[in-house]
Image (cartoon, grey):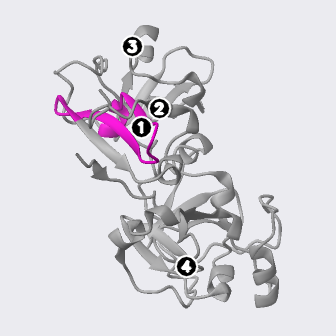
Amino acid sequence: MTGDFVSYRDGTLVRAEGDSAVYLIYHGTKRPIANLTTFAQLHLKWKNVVVHPAADSGYLDRYKTEPTINLVNLNNLPNGLVVRFKGPAVYSVVGGKLKPYPRPSVFETHHRWNEISIFRRNLSVSQLEAEVFSEEDPMSVSDEQLESVQMNIDPTPFRYRGGSLVRTQGEATVYYTAGTKKYPVPSMQVFQDLKLHWSSVRNSEAGVLTAIDPATNLPLYNRSDLPSTVDTTILRARAWRKSNEATVNLTTYQDGKRKCLQFSTLSVFLNRFGSNEVGVVSPSTDACGR
């Protein structure tokens, strides 16, 4: 049995091992970045490019290829790009608009801080190209940063990514988030039964979780009465791979039924989850890790 295909998350920069072509991922599609100059004008960093293993050479062919990004228009930036201008606000380009992240804890469930393109003014092409290979992350606000571009702001900010574990700082209750809902984990026993990790729980800023609609307690993952409206990501029982294979599988539950998602390589899995969430099972284990 082959699990469902899982893509890199939106905004990921990826290239195939042995190939210099770099793609920007968005909604299961890939857009080639034309050249180093374009890469630099987007204020991207080479160190953030994920190298997809040569052993899985056909993986990137499964993405639909969209038009090449070959001209940087500051008023029409490519979808998937994570950007920051003058000031602390961070956005992703979604549907041609700037969609904001309302709080740092929300951003951290979607991206890493070093993935932000920080647009600065008065830099020559040669200066931009030199910065591509720099190891520094220019996160501080300065007068060099570009004023906001003329793109529309999406009035609906990002929410916590589905499957996030969040609690308000200083409070004990941990919640799963899924769309507009938050599901309280009723006990530490349920937390353990779901194969969750305390290191994955994020502290939310005061007031953020109160704006998310409450839902009833999430049932145990191996029950047959799981709510069909819940984001399947949050119902994962475990991630696993066979000891003789590189493919990582994620066992989830949807509509009360066991389902397998397949990450063709560990790099795809780590693009979304943590390395401490993968278990190794024997080669004789069946398709869903049982």
* Distance Cα–Cα, label 4 vs label 3: 48 Å
Closer to the N terminus: mark 4 or mark 3? 4
Quarter holding the C terminus? top left
Query: Which residue does the numbered mark 1 point to in the structure image?
Result: 242
Query: Which residue does the numbered mark 3 point to in the structure image?
Result: 190
> Does dot 2 land on a helix, a strand or a loop?
strand
Query: Which residue does the numbered mark 4 point to in the structure image?
Result: 150
* Distance Cα–Cα, label 3 vs label 1: 26 Å
Which residue type carries mark 4?
A: Gln
Would residue 134 appear left or right of 164 to someone viewing this image?
A: right
Residue 122 on the magenta segment: no
Q: Is residue 211 above or below residue 141?
A: above
Would residue 217 appear left or right of 55 to someone viewing this image?
A: left
Disc assigned to residue 280: 2
The residue positioned 50% from the left and 72% from the top of the image is: 24
Closer to the N terminus: mark 3 or mark 1? 3
Visible in this render: residue 201?
A: no
Visible in this render: residue 200?
A: yes
Where is residue 171 drawn, in percent x and y? 57, 16
**Marks 4 and 2 close (CB-CB < 8 Å):** no
* Distance Cα–Cα, label 4 vs label 1: 50 Å
**Marks 2 and 1 close (CB-CB < 8 Å):** yes
Quarter holding the N terminus? top left
In the rendered image, which quarter is residue 87 located in? Answer: bottom right
> Does dot 1 land on a helix, a strand or a loop?
strand
> Does dot 3 land on a helix, a strand or a loop?
helix
Residue range corresponding to the magenta coloring: 232-258
Residue 233 on the magenta segment: yes
The residue positioned 53% from the left and 47% from the top of the image is: 270
Which residue type carries mark 3?
A: Val
